[in-house]
Image (cartoon, grey):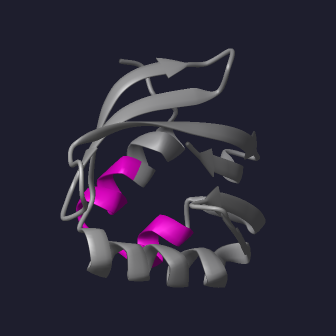
Amino acid sequence: MNLPKVIVELVKTQNNFDSAAYAKCFTATAVVFDEGKTHHGRKEIETWIEKANKEYQAIMKPLEYSETAQTLRTEVSGTFPGSPIIMTYHYEFEDGLIQSLKIV
């Protein structure tokens, strides 16, 4: 699968539970939408993923990437009910970083 460099880095940092490096995959003004909440900017994104890592210990396995739709389907497993589940990550990019991420 031919993934953009920033997505490869995002998956790697997620699977290493490195919230600081994960947040660096985003622009300074990025927005993340997940579980009905919105997180603005790198600091909020880092805080959000740090909490999620502690609570769920989620590991991402890329399944399918669409460059035209800017989506990544993943199998996510962790310490949450129903694990593993299939999730879709919807991206918008800016200057090689993630500007917007919506997880469904």
Tell whether position 39 is magenta: no
Picture coordinates of residue 29, whole percent (x, y)? 81, 68
Picture coordinates of residue 8, whole percent (x, y)? 40, 42
Q: Is residue 8 left or right of residue 26?
A: left
Picture coordinates of residue 37, whole percent (x, y)? 67, 68
Picture coordinates of residue 96, whole percent (x, y)? 67, 45
Tell me the quadrant of the picture where the N terminus can be found. top left
In the rendered structure, which segment of residues is drawn in magenta? 11-23
- The residue at the point 30 percent across, 40 percent down is 85
Residue 93 or residue 49, whichever sits in front? 49
Residue 101 or residue 96, whichever sits in front? 101
Residue found at the far front of this picture: 81
Tell me the quadrant of the picture where the C terminus can be found. top right
Tell how many labels: 0
Q: From the viewer's perspective, is residue 27 above or below residue 18?
A: above
- The residue at the point 41 percent across, 80 percent down is 50
Residue 96 or residue 72, whichever sits in front? 72
Q: Is residue 72 left or right of residue 80?
A: right
Q: From the viewer's perspective, is residue 60 above or below residue 56?
A: above
